[in-house]
Image (spheres, rainbow, N blue to C red):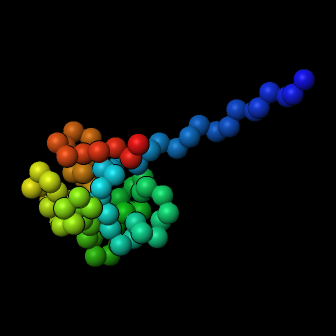
Amino acid sequence: MTPEPTPSAAPRALAPFCVHIQSKKAYFLGRPPNTEAELLDASQSCWCRRTMQALGPDRGLVDPADCRAGRACYEPVL
């Protein structure tokens, strides 16, 4: 009889941001950012990978505070 696997720690919550938000700092993270500090560097600049601009597909500004569930163009990480 094989032993039962031990339950692991609860998985981390997925990123609260849209999968398309990008920044220079996020390139080095290696996973989706979970906080604004993990996404933004000193320049505070980010862009949408769908439009490749600071404006999203809905013509709204790309910002971690806005690129979340509820926005028309939002897409979750999974």
Question: What's the residue at 85%, 28% (across, down)?
Answer: 3
Residue furthest bottom in the image: 43
Q: Nearer the viewer, residue 22 or 13?
A: 22
Judge left or right: residue 43 versus residue 53: right
Judge left or right: residue 48 versus residue 5: left
Question: What's the residue at 70%, 32% (across, down)?
Answer: 7
Residue furthest right in the image: 1
Judge left or right: residue 8 versus residue 21: right
Residue furthest top in the image: 1
Residue 1 picture location, percent across and down: 90, 23
Question: What's the residue at 42%, 57% (across, down)?
Answer: 33
Residue 18 picture location, percent across and down: 30, 50
* Residue 76 higher or lower than 44, as above or below: above
Residue 78 picture location, percent across and down: 41, 42
* Residue 72 higher or lower than 23, as above or below: above
Residue 35 picture location, percent across and down: 39, 55
Count of labels in the image: 0
Residue furthest front in the image: 50
